[in-house]
């Protein structure tokens, strides 16, 4: 049998049974379509996920949070009153210890020295402090309360938001960048005035945190604005004078006793001792509700921004009321080094987590979803392969006389098997090709629909397609289809090769 016959004979056999061949091939087409589509969207989602996360440095970041005391260790010191069984006593002891841990036990402090230690760890590029310490911005005799934020010098989003001046050039630069909203609150309204504000000196003042036990007073303004320095000073004056006039108030003896007890341990008012002056080098615009910035936990959108080195010095200096920061974010040089640095931080008794861990879990979830879709598609192809095997077994019975003639003229068993295997491979190649083409064509409306949904529900505009068809995917899908259909033809091919030529020639 000539080599050309190995291709002509299978094609002729398939053409003779056009309807059966069409239905058999359609099974392969739809199985391949589902397989290609699931692999395509799976790869596209992972590519999009990696692309979006790598737009920022989130994968290289480690967040250090306050580490509170050990509830189990504190539980041993707790005394529970009353007559009760030991199981209930232990539960109450643990509950009291947990409450005391959250309310009274100080966290492991992120001091100036500890921040320096973290900055000296291998692979750490920057340590950005974060604190809930508020302060006052004073400009031209006017003051406004504001949150003080620390930022990296390579914050690309902040640089894009600059409307006047420049951004920081070094992490220790003694300068400040402010928002146009803070300037507006300070009375800088006109465009020309904003331009003139660059270069002026802005004073930053800290107030002491009122975390010690004692009497606290508050004032809530109807316009929702924060308290000014003068209003805070007035409240402090009332608080200082209150113990002296307490007896003149119309209070019951028990109420008077309660307030006197609360005020007895109150420390005197501490005037702000930290006042630092910085030149304004830049102004950033306020973020509108339509902006869609890249997700980056280290990106700062505060009204008063300092470079992280200057902020660390300000927060932890000996004259500061803060002296420790609440949290810190470490920027690591590479994604691959995050886990080793995280382990080192944990060994130092600090509570920390890496955003990379959460993204790994998200990635695993997507992988499991699309792996399930791929398995369903593979099962569909296997079902189609069973149909091919059944069809070709029927073909062997119908072509018994043809098989006998081929063996009578000298066709070997191997050649006969090869003819049927080529038939199966042709069905897989044609069906796989059409299924892949159908997946590619369907990806255009499918991609438009998915991107519209994401934009509508998540307010995220995706720039690139979610359905991708790289070369490896196309070749893999085609090869899998051909292999499955060829394997389905193995048993019918062996049955054809085992046919006795004499019996086959007598077959009607």
Image (cartoon, helix red, strand yellow):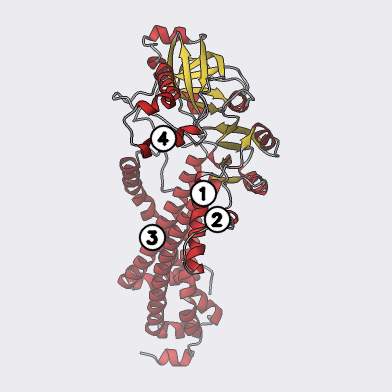
Q: Nearer the viewer, mark 3 or mark 4?
A: 4
Q: Earlier in the sequence, mark 2 or mark 3?
A: 3
Q: Nearer the viewer, mark 1 or mark 4?
A: 4
Q: Position of residue 365 (x, y in %)?
A: 46, 56
Q: Nearer the viewer, mark 2 or mark 3?
A: 2
Pick out the residue farthest to the left: 222
Total number of numbered discs in the rendering: 4
Q: CA distance from mark 3 to mark 4?
A: 74 Å
Q: Earlier in the sequence, mark 3 or mark 4?
A: 3
Nearer to us in this view, 78 or 505: 78
Q: Secondary structure at mark 3?
A: helix
Q: CA distance from mark 2 to mark 4?
A: 28 Å
The circle on residue 100 is 1
Q: On the image, numbered disc 2 is attached to which residue?
A: 78
Q: Secondary structure at mark 2?
A: loop
Nearer to us in this view, 493 or 407: 493
Let me know if residue 363 appears in the view. Answer: no
Q: On the image, numbered disc 4 is attached to which residue?
A: 259
Q: Nearer the viewer, mark 3 or mark 1?
A: 1
Label 2: how many Cα within 10 Å (few below 14, some 14–19, many 20+): some
Q: On the image, numbered disc 3 is attached to which residue?
A: 34
């Amino acid at each position: 049998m000539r080599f050309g016959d190995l291709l002509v004979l299978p094609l002729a056999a398939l053409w003779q049974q056009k309807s059966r061949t069409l239905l058999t091939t359609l099974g392969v087409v739809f199985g391949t379509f589902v397989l290609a589509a699931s692999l395509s969207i799976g790869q596209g989602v992972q590519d999009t996920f990696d692309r979006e996360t790598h737009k920022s440095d989130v994968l290289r970041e480690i967040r250090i949070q306050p580490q509170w005391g050990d509830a189990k260790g504190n539980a041993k010191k707790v005394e529970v009153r009353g007559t009760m069984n030991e199981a209930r006593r232990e539960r109450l002891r643990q509950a009291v210890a947990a409450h005391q841990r959250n309310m009274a036990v100080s966290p492991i402090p992120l001091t100036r020295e500890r921040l320096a230690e973290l900055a000296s760890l291998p692979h750490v590029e920057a340590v950005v402090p974060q604190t809930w310490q508020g302060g006052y911005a004073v400009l031209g005799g006017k003051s406004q309360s504001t949150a003080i934020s620390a930022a990296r010098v390579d914050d690309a989003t902040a640089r894009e938001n600059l409307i006047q001046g420049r951004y920081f050039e070094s992490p220790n630069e003694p300068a400040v960048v402010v928002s146009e909203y803070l300037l507006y609150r300070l009375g800088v309204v006109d465009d020309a005035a904003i331009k003139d504000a660059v270069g002026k000196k802005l004073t930053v003042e800290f107030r002491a945190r009122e975390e010690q036990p004692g009497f606290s007073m508050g004032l809530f303004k109807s316009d929702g604005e924060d308290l000014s320095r003068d209003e805070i000073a007035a409240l402090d004056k009332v608080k200082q004078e209150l113990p002296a006039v307490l007896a003149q108030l119309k209070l019951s003896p028990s109420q008077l006793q309660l307030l006197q007890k609360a005020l007895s341990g109150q420390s005197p008012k501490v005037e702000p001792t930290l006042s630092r002056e910085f030149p304004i080098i830049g102004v950033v615009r306020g973020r509108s509700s339509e902006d869609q910035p890249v997700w980056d936990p280290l990106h700062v959108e505060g009204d008063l921004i300092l470079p992280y080195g200057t902020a660390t010095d300000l927060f932890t200096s000996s004259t500061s009321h803060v002296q420790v920061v609440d949290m810190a974010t470490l920027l690591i040089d590479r994604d691959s080094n995050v886990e080793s640095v995280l382990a080192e931080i944990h060994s130092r008794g600090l509570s920390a987590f890496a955003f990379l861990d959460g993204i790994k879990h998200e990635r695993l979830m997507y992988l499991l979803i699309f792996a399930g879709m791929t398995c369903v598609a593979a099962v569909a192809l296997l079902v189609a392969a069973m149909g091919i095997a059944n069809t070709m077994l029927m073909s062997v019975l119908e072509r018994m006389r043809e098989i006998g003639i081929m063996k009578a003229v000298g066709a070997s068993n191997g050649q006969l098997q090869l003819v049927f295997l080529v038939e199966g491979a042709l069905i897989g190649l044609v069906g796989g090709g059409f299924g892949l083409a159908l997946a590619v064509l369907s990806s255009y409306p499918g991609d438009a629909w998915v991107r519209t949904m994401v934009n509508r529900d998540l307010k995220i505009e995706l720039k690139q397609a979610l359905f991708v068809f790289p070369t490896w995917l196309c070749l893999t899908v085609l090869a899998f289809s051909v292999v499955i259909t060829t394997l389905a033809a193995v048993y019918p091919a062996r049955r054809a090769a085992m046919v006795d030529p004499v019996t086959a020639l007598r077959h009607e």
